[in-house]
Amino acid sequence: MDRRRRVGILMTALATAGALMAVTGLAGGAQGTGTITGVVTMNDPPPPSTLAATADQTVCGDTAPNETIVADSDGHVANAVVRVTGLAWPDDGPPPTINNVDCRFVPHVQIARTRSQLEITSADDTLHSTHAYDDRNRTDFNIAMPFAGMNVTRPLRRPGAVRIECDSHTWMRGWVVVSNDRGVVSMPDGMFTIENVPAGTHEVTIWHETLGAQPRSVTVAAGETTMVEFTLQ
């Protein structure tokens, strides 16, 4: 076999291998993961209620919404944290943030990666504190926010449910669930979606500030969406 023929055969083989690798890579990327979606519900949801604002009514108003349980009349529950055990967070993404708005913590509930930096700010022209208690009821940090527009950053060092309170306005409360496992918070219609979950069987857990449910075992098929439902008690 002459040299030019050998070179031609080699180039053809390399081109074919490259094409197969490209197709395999695309297929693997598309088929190697799936999506978990679902809904969080409860039986006998309570009607909406309010809490009395006992200070700074010119800024806070007379009442604030009671966000302990947020559910519509059909029992769809917001503010439930759904996590996939062992599912890693992406390397990039926006940092978690919490804002003091109309004497409320916004968002009321969120999930954040362990060792991420929580950005704290205030839109209210009054003295707030962002007082964080870890799951052992120990102070994690306590930041005074005396005027609107302040921005402070604090680390979220260890996993657990961090309770956020304001020492100046006792009705204010929020939660940051710090987790090694990636998750999302259910929307006002109770729905949630977690994308890019590796194919296989996973444990899916749920957290709510007052309600609870057992973990679920969920099998994710490559390139497909798996539905799961949680009914909180």
Image: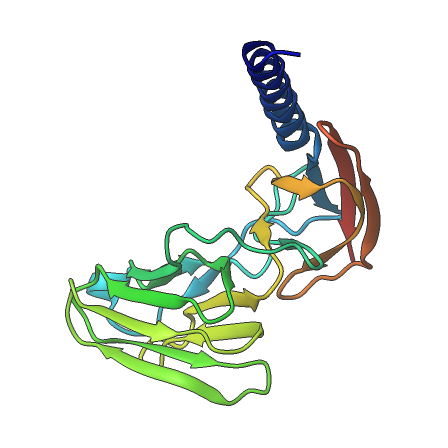
Residue 83: horizontal and vertical position, in percent?
A: 66, 55
- Horizontal and vertical percent for residue 122? 24, 63
Left or right, 29 with reference to 144: right
- Kindly give the residue lying farthest to the bottom in the view shown: 138
Image location (x, y in percent) of residue 32: 70, 35
Q: Nearer the viewer, residue 217 or 50?
A: 217
In front here: 208 or 57?
208
The quadrant where residue 197 appears: top right
Identify whether 73 is placed above or below 217. above
Q: In the rendered view, does 50 fall on the left or right side of 57? A: right
Point out the residue furthest to the front here. Answer: 2
Compared with 183, 144 (above or below) is below
210 or 90, which is in the foreground? 90
Query: In which quadrant of the rendered image does the N terminus lie?
Result: top right
At 71% from the left and 58% from the top, the residue drawn is: 85
Q: Is residue 36 above or below residue 87?
A: above
Numbered circles on residues, count: 0
Q: 121 and 114: which one is in front?
A: 114
**Quarter holding the C terminus?**
bottom right
- On the question of residue 191 being in view, the answer is no
For the question of whether residue 131 can be seen, the reply is yes
In the rendered structure, the answer to whether residue 206 lies left or right of residue 119 reads right
Provide residue 221's location: percent of width, then percent of height. 79, 33
- Here the colouring is rainbow
170 relative to 209 in the view: left or right: left
